Structures are given as C-alpha cells and as structure tokens.
Amino acid sequence: EAGVAQSPRYKIIEKRQSVAFWCNPISGHATLYWYQQILGQGPKLLIQFQNNGVVDDSQLPKDRFSAERLKGVDSTLKIQPAKLEDSAVYLCASSFQGAGGETQYFGPGTRLLVL
Amino acid sequence: QKEVEQDPGPLSVPEGAIVSLNCTYSNSAFQYFMWYRQYSRKGPELLMYTYSSGNKEDGRFTAQVDKSSKYISLFIRDSQPSDSATYLCAMIGAGGTSYGKLTFGQGTILTVHP
C-alpha cells in the first residue's frame, strides 16, 4: 500500500513570496490533515478535511494560509504572503474515516525555509 | 500551560540500555494515546497505540498509561543505534474540542550510541 505522498520535499523562498504544497493521501482515506512542525516542537494541526469539506480549521492563520481538497482526494496548502516565522516542516496525514481514535498516517513532509 | 508536556531531552544512552520516555497531560478528555517515532527528515510513524490504563507490549517496546495521574510512558529495552530518533507522544480526545484531533508533545530526541 502506497503511503502519503507530498511535494516538493524542500522549498526556499523570500518573505512576502507565495508557496504551495501538494499532498496525495493513502487511497481510500476520507480524512486529510495538514500539520505545521516548527523545529524542536511537535506537529500542530492546521486544518482537517473530511472528503472535500473542512472539519476543523481553527488553528489555520486564514489571513495568509489557505487550503483546498477538490474532489476529496489530493489537497493543496498555500501560504501568501510568507513570513519568516512560517519556516517549518509541513506534514500531511490521512486516516480512513477520521473517527475518534483512528490512526493517522503521515507523509515525509515539505521543509520550508523563508528568508 | 500546554495540554501535553514532554521533556525534549536530548537523551543519549549506550547500546543495550533501557530507555524511558514520558509525557504528562492535563486534558481529561484524552482517551487514546500514541507514541510516534520520527527519523531525521522523515514524517512521524506510529509506534505504539493504546487506549486503556496499564501496559501494552510490542517486542522491545512497552507503552504504559496511567489515566489517574495523567501520565504516559514508553520503555525501550535493549536499545539499538537504529532507535535513534525523535519520539513524540500524542493523544486524541473522545469528545469536546479534542475529538479526533491529535495533540502532540514536544518530542524527545534520543541517541543510542554503539
């Protein structure tokens, strides 16, 4: 079974530029998550999708971050404009249904450096 | 106060040692407890999963949960250099705002040297 795929793996941009990350979840997984992991910290949930609908985006900085999951499969996370503090690893995860105790499977992440 | 507290280490042990990793939490709604292992430049991978107080063993790994004290532990026996990674505790709530949402600890960096 293929895992969660993410691209690009690395990205370096200057502040105020825009950037987009792509995620392809495990086949058949209805729930998709985007996490932000700052160096030395645990991952923090940014947004959760159930199929193509948003379940939780309470910690997404909506003035600069946006995400979509068209057709309920792949997802894109965008930052515009980027700030220095957005330097982090952006992890995508998926789970079968998003039920309470369900296991989430993570992709390798996209490492973003904002200069 | 963070909902999940984890000592970031770093922790350095010799090969063959017993390693103890710990987390405390404050949210009583947390009912599912996990340990993830994260190698450098990789995503977290699930190592252990439990939802009841007590011990759960899987090979060299034992997860321990004490809900009354809001304390969880991961023990690694006969540690190997390949165990060198960051270990993240994570929890999910059974209801309320934490339902279905993974809350992670800070992660403990472990190095096992030959």
Image: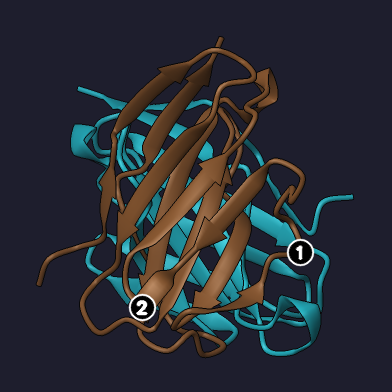
Chain colours: A brown, B cyan
- Rendered location of residue B32, percent (x, y): 57, 80
Q: What residue is shown at x 41% (from left), y 71% (from top)?
A: A70
Chain of the residue under label 1: A
Q: Which residue is situated farthest in the right direction here? A: B1
B15 displayed left or right of B30: left
The relative height of residue A11 versus residue B22 in the rendered view (above or below) is above
- Picture disc at residue A58: 1
Q: What residue is shown at x 21% (from left), y 32% (from top)?
A: B81
Chain of the residue under label 2: A
Q: Amino acid at mark 2?
A: Lys
- Rendered location of residue B64, percent (x, y): 52, 70
Mark 2: secondary structure: helix
Q: Residues within 10 Å of mark 2 (few under 14, many from 20)?
A: few
- Picture disc at residue A71: 2
Looking at the rendered image, the quarter that the C terminus of chain B falls into is top left
- Rendered location of residue B92, percent (x, y): 62, 75
